[in-house]
Image (tube, rainbow, N blue to C red):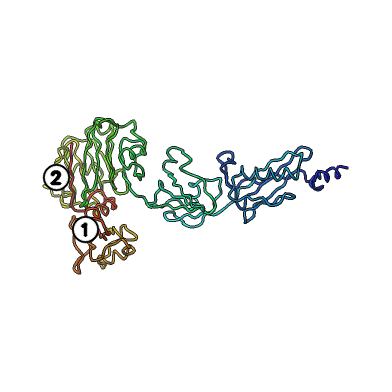
Amino acid sequence: MRAQENAAKGLEPELTKPAERFQPAAPPLPVPLEGPLDAQHYTCGPGDGFELNFWGAQNFKLRATTDLEGKAFLPRIGYVPVSGKTLADVRATVRKAVQRHFPGLNFELSLIEPRTFLVHLVDNVSRPGLVRATQVERLSSVIERAGGVTAGGSRRRIQIRHRDGRTQVADLVLYAQTGRTEENPFLLDGDVVHVPFEALTASITGGVNRPGRYELVASKDFDELFSIAGGYSTAVTRELPLTLVRRDEKGRSILRRLEPPFPGRDVPKLPIEQGDSIDVPTIAQLEKTVLLVGAIQGAISTDESTALKRLVFAEGDTVRTLVLRAGGVLTGADLPHAALVHENGSVDDVDLDALLVQHNAAADRPVSIGDTLMVPFKRRSVIVEGAVFRPGSYPYNPRFALIDYVGAAGGPTRFARSLKESHLITADGQTKALSDALRVNPGDIVVVPERDFSRPEIVQLVLSATGLLLGAATIAIALHR
């Protein structure tokens, strides 16, 4: 009798057998979820597993998996187009089809197993190529599965290109600092994720909540750098000026003091240039101290090229006693080219080789409160910059000429001028044109100029990319109060 009633309702008899009315629970999801699935935003595709549950006069369920063509087959209903539609749209489509074949029953469509698909991760990731992903995990998780962003790769301008041509940009630094999930989106089948190189970067140290080196992508001024560094910390003091270290076009480090107050703002209105380093003063600096910068034992690294150490001033201090109290210099120090910078802006050259190695007392200098002893690092490599495919630092080879270093850097790009216009910037700041007699030495910079760039712009680009605090041989520091 019941079988006849089921047949009249259009139900298959086997679906109502007691042994098949209920099936085991669905297997656990391949990844944990951060919350309930949003049917309005989840986009369905090949591999998604669905379950259609019926209840009321009869209780049973139907299961279906989307095939490779993006269609799901439901018994007695037929094929339902799924690919590219949101889960909410698929439910609406199935509802219309089900009502015609199973009248009088309540039903609902559920996603029980999200699909796994492939996305393309390219450029500055540790393991570029195809990476497995699901639509319930975010960009950061997929990048970590590929080994993370490499050194020099941008975490603020990650471009996602979808198959339909749409693009979006993700900022994982802002996501980590603010929790704004739109900066760390979900991915779709076939997405191409491009991680570019960092563009404009600057460092900030001292009395801020998140000191470090950051890429600037918006206003590219001190206001953006200050904001991404988390603002002033509780250790900040407003009684001392901010200090800015910036390279000039000859590669020399220029130290500027930014005196408060700043009209109408808590921070100065200051455009940032590549490689700038800003120190925000702290309460500790109000003490009677001296600052040691560079190749000093125990100095705290503020970025890949700068290290600082501050000591309490002792009456009668000299350069020698100051270095000894600091623990000495590092093996990579450029001893003959140290400098002592006084608060009034004057600079004394200090030959630490004569003072510390030859024990020549005449090379010693008295130290005053607020002085800065700068000990540069030796450069033991050759830097190739400009219009080459792989600009950067390369090991010194005494057999290499200028053209050999250009070849090691991948050769000139299509934007390069003639190789005859390439030139060398020596460690002491001299510029030498290409010639047969030209020798390349450790610390030199090989420049392959680009077309339509002026020489000052090229030198600015080349030297800012080195990220070094001091020149190997000359230190020119200007202090403006």
Q: Earlier in the sequence, mark 2 or mark 1?
A: 2
Give the percent coordinates (x, y) of residue 388: 31, 61
Labelled disc at residue 184? none
**Residue toward you, 337 or 201:** 201
Give the residue drawn at x 29%, y 62%.
416
Give the percent coordinates (x, y) of residue 443: 24, 57
Quadrant of the rendered image containing residue 370: top left
The residue that label 2 is drawn on is 348
Task: Tell me if residue 328 comes above or below residue 281 in the rendering.
Answer: below
Residue type, mark 2 in image: Asp
Q: Quadrant of the C terminus?
A: top left
Give the residue drawn at x 33%, y 36%.
208
Left of 208 or right of it: where is 14?
A: right
Can residue 95 be spotted in the picture?
yes
Q: Farthest right residue?
A: 1
**Residue toward you, 65 or 335:** 65
Q: Quadrant of the N terminus?
A: top right
Left of 1 or right of it: where is 314?
A: left
**Residue toward you, 10 or 284:** 10
Give the percent coordinates (x, y) of residue 95: 68, 43
Give the residue drawn at x 30%, y 32%.
236
User: Tag 2, which secondary structure?
Assistant: strand
Give the percent coordinates (x, y) of residue 186: 52, 46
Can residue 381 be spotted in the picture?
no
Which class describes the residues within 10 Å of circle 1: few (<14), some (14-19), or many (20+)?
A: many
The residue that label 1 is drawn on is 425
Which class describes the residues within 10 Å of circle 2: few (<14), some (14-19), or many (20+)?
A: few
Left of 294 or right of it: where is 81?
A: right
Q: How far is the residue under mark 2 from the one under mark 1?
A: 25 Å
